[in-house]
Image (cartoon, rainbow, N blue to C red):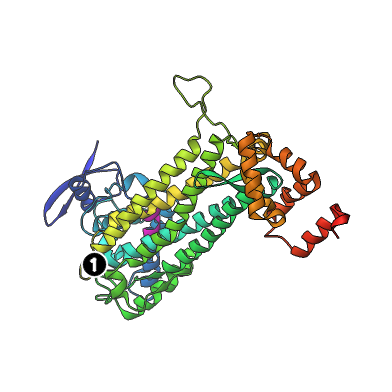
Amino acid sequence: MEFRVERDFLGEVNIPAERYYGIHTARSAGNFNLSDNKVSFDLIKAFALVKKAAAITNEKLGYLDEVIANAIIKSCDEIVGGKFREDFIVDVFQGGAGTSTNMNVNEVIANRANEILGYEKGKYFPVHPLEHVNLHQSTNDTYPSALKIASLFLLQNLSEEIAKFQGVLQKKEKEFTSVMKIGRTELQEAVPITLGREFSGFADAVSRDRWRIWKALERLRILNIGGTAIGTGLAAPKDYIFEVIDVLRDLTGLNISRHENPVSVTAFVDDFVEVVGIIDAYISNLFKISNDLRMMNLLKEIRLKPVQPGSSIMPGKVNPVIMESAIQISIRVRADFAVVRECSSLASFQIAEFMPLLAFSFIESLKLLIKTTKMVAEHIEGIKPLTDNCKNYFEKSFSIVTALLPLIGYEKAAELVKELESRNIENIKQFLEDKLGKGIVEKFLSAEYLNSLGYDEEELEEFLDDINPKRS
């Protein structure tokens, strides 16, 4: 392997000649060789957009030569397009509030820009990573801004997957609308319901989550770009500070704006804490739906699509592995959310120094949720109702007597249940038909009646008069 030598005030470092990162990145990689987790490329691409916006603004306002600016812009475009992944080598568990990440981006852009202009990597002429790529910027305004941009794109993707998830649940709601079954409370049989109505509850919960994701997008659209080191804009010209956010908005297509008090959002990252609180509601719903489907599969009310053999020793065993995976992801994401809260709390004075871990945890959680939501939605599409089993549970449950309360009252219903228990009657629906008449039972235990919201007293009276003319 061939090397080039780069120098800083601490000394010299050998850098692989073909690599685009530089001495600061190499030192960071050596200092923080801690895990297999490198900075998310979603964050790197967002960083490149920030650097591009800065270069465009600085060139427009006369602070950056056009030739240098264009080389920087082209380099940024290549990163956004997916190039140079192997050059972003910094570990997520880095100290320095993200300076290592910022410098990694600056060096790759500078070296590629110099190469575009026909100069050698590592010489940093005519394009310098700090003098040009990082002009009028600090880690403390570029890192949070890049993180918010990456997060906004991921939240948009999550919103799209949740919308598809809701659509699948609504489809199943219609498909299962006439499948009668027994509801359950406290893990015990409860009043009758239809499988479709149960899925309507799932769909409605997920629809609320779509609204919540929109609120999360709103919370992250305010940036501190232009605030430089501590939010005061020190060492940046006023015209740059006000212009760069407009350029960044045009580049990203996101509804972003500059915060009126950059000092506040440089020192505090509570907006991320608020967002994980909002998304945590979706985690609760995803967890519950996955677990409910797992138990419905256990009860053989539904059949989850078999996707892999379930045992290395028991032939033919199939496990609800997709639901189990979703539950594990829910647990993992909640752990990431706890990290976000802790990193926010540990911010001190004018800086949030634990942004790298916050960023890693937040981006990981969003990417996991996007993939998991898609996985669960696709799996639910393959669910089949076990109608006969649902009917069997339904017809053998004492709880179906509850549907007749408007007709016979609580005391009479209790007497019927007592008789059912004493005689050990299994086909309860048939017993009720013998006692009350087939027409009445079919009416009160129909999918139409059970899916309606309560009953209409006048309609009930008319129905009873029709089946029993002597009553009137």
| Secondary structure that dominates the magenta span | helix
Relative to residue 278, is residue 196 drawn left or right? Answer: right
Give the answer, above or below, for where 300 lies relative to 231.
above
Residue 31 visible somewhere in the drawing: yes
Relative to residue 332, is residue 309 drawn left or right? Answer: right
Q: Residue 155: x percent and y percent?
A: 47, 58
Which corner quadrant of the image does residue 242 belong to?
A: bottom left
User: Is 111 in front, or is 199?
Assistant: 199
Quarter containing the C terminus: bottom right
Relative to residue 127, is residue 255 drawn left or right? Answer: right
Quarter containing the N terminus: top left
User: Is 316 in front, or is 470?
Assistant: 470
Relative to residue 104, is residue 285 drawn left or right? Answer: right
Dot 1: element: loop
Which residue lies at the image location 44% right of the left edge and 19% below the top edge?
313
Which residue lies at the image location 32% right of the left edge and 80% below the top edge?
238
User: Is 306 in front, or is 353?
Assistant: 306
Which residue lies at the image location 36% right of the left edge and 71% below the top edge?
58
Q: Residue 183: x percent and y percent?
A: 59, 46
* Region in magenta: 41-47
Q: Residue 374: x percent and y percent?
A: 53, 46
Say if the magenta span includes residue 42.
Answer: yes
Say if the magenta span includes residue 92.
Answer: no
**What residue is shown with label 1?**
351
| Number of numbered callouts drawn | 1
User: Is 243 in front, or is 358?
Assistant: 358
